[in-house]
Amino acid sequence: MDCGRSPEEIAQIYKSISLEQVYATILYYLQNKQTISAYMKNWISKSVLKNQPM
């Protein structure tokens, strides 16, 4: 995760995405925090369950 990095730094690190795409992603996240948080929580819980020994 790129906590604390500027959009410009992220675009420089990840050459396959443009600065505009970084800003669009940030905007999408800020407008959909609850949906994204629920999705991530579900994804993480499925990952944890999948990796537990039976």
Image: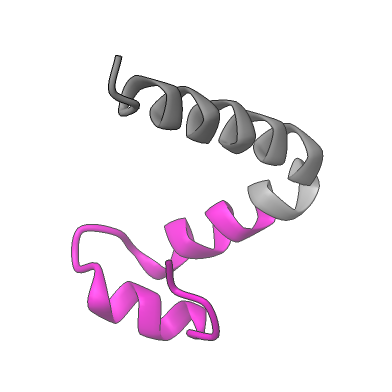
Give percent across and percent down for residue 27. 67, 56
Instruction: Residue lying at the far top in this picture: please name it.
Output: 54
Give percent across and percent down for residue 49. 43, 23
- Locate residue 28 relative to residue 46 in the image: left or right: right
- Locate residue 2 relative to residue 26 in the image: left or right: left
In which quadrant of the rendered image does the C terminus lie?
top left
Q: Which residue is at 54% across, 85% downward?
A: 4
Give percent across and percent down for residue 46. 47, 22
Instruction: Residue lying at the far left in this picture: please name it.
Output: 15
Where residue 2 sits, quadrant-wise, is: bottom left
Q: Vertically, is 6 above or below 22?
A: below
Question: Is 19 part of what is drawn in magenta?
Answer: yes
Q: Vertically, is 21 above or below 38?
A: below
- Locate residue 42 relative to residue 8 in the image: left or right: right
Q: Which residue is at 35% across, 21% downward?
A: 50
- Of residue 19 and residue 53, the one placed in the foreground of this image is 53
- Locate residue 35 relative to residue 15 in the image: left or right: right
Where residue 48 sits, quadrant-wise, is: top left
Give percent across and percent down for residue 21. 44, 56
User: The magenta stretch spans which residues?
Assistant: 1-27
In which quadrant of the rendered image does the N terminus lie?
bottom left
- Of residue 33 and residue 43, the one placed in the foreground of this image is 43
Q: Vertically, is 10 above or below 28?
A: below
Q: Which residue is at 42% across, 83% downward?
A: 8
Question: Is 6 part of what is drawn in magenta?
Answer: yes
Q: Which residue is at 66% across, 38% downward?
A: 36
Color encoding of the figure: one colour
Q: How many labels does the image show?
A: 0
